[in-house]
Image (tube, rainbow, N blue to C red):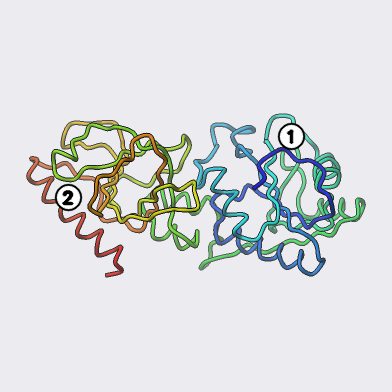
Amino acid sequence: MSTHQPAASPRPAVVTIGVFDGVHRGHEALLGAARDQARKRGLPLTVLTFDPHPLSVVRPDAAPCRLASLAHRVHLLHEAGADEVRVLPFDAALSHKSPREFVDHVLVDDLQAAAVVTGANFRFGHRAAGDTGTLRELGEEFGFAVVAVPLATSGDAPWSSTRIRELIRTGDVAGAAVGLGRPYRVSGEVVRGAQRGRDLGYPTANLALVPGTCVPADGVYAARAVLDPESTRERFVPAAVSVGANTTFGETEARIEAYLMEPGEWDLYGRPMALDFIDRIRGMQTFADVSDLQRAMADDVARAGRILAGG
């Protein structure tokens, strides 16, 4: 996969542009149209994406949480049919390029775009001054075609990263999975926690997330733990996951703790792990005593097992 600054492509390409955070169903519609254009023209498909998110540069206070790490995003874009993924570092200099400068320097000089496929709401250039009409005008001047793709919708609302972030924020991970086309995944390193779970009979792996990750609402979830997520040998293990602070013990710091529901001695500390969230079981509760908590945990594990088994 390619995650470097743009350099001259060896041949013309069909180019599609966006942040593509989460690579969701809305993005799939755009990528599908771009693949069709690439096949018709006999050209490779180049996906141009940005990191960090442009809002983190132009409006840091409004920067959204991330639905996928950069590495996962690039992987998903290749799975969606990209022949090449170019990651353009978004900085102040790039944010101040006019629409013409962006087209001339990036799309023409660096990417040799023969056609550019964008969403119908695409904006670009300093202060988002350019739109698809601007792009078409510049395309006529510089010699590339422009295809604007309508937004993919569900009901009356388009599938967007903003919509999926809101579903995750409220704990509707099942709804988010519909929009993503797969379970919502978070990833990080397994770190040592308070180790109370072991004493309660449910030892957990504590996940330290990549900063800026979108975190589901506090509660208990059925999930799949993904071991070795950065390799081609991913192993999936059913899990019950707690998100939030354990208020029964007076804790205030939120944690993500996964109880792996397969027997075994898991050597996970210091290693990467991911969690695919399948469904929410309940919200967080404060229990009167430890025995009530243990009964609730037993019920959570049983319910997670039924959910993950499709029952």
In the depicted structure, whether residue 58 falls above or below residue 200: above
x%, y% of residue 62? 54, 36
x%, y% of residue 100? 85, 42
Residue 145, picture quadrant: bottom right
Judge from the rendering whether residue 104 lies leftward or rightward of residue 258; answer left or right: right
Tell me how far mark 2 sits from mark 1, CA to CA: 50 Å
Nearest-to-viewer mark from 2 and 1 = 2
Q: What's under tag 1, amino acid-wise?
A: Leu
Judge from the rendering whether residue 119 lies leftward or rightward of residue 208; answer left or right: right
The residue sitting at 86% across, 43% down in the picture is 109
Q: What's under tag 2, amino acid-wise?
A: Met
Residue that label 2 marks: 297
Name the residue nearer the viewer: 51 or 164.
51
Which quarter of the image is occupied by the C terminus? Answer: bottom left
Residue that label 1 marks: 94
Sequence-earlier tag: 2 or 1 = 1
The residue sitting at 16% across, 37% down in the picture is 248
Dot 2, crowdedness within 10 Å: few (<14), some or many (≥20)? Answer: many
x%, y% of residue 15? 76, 54
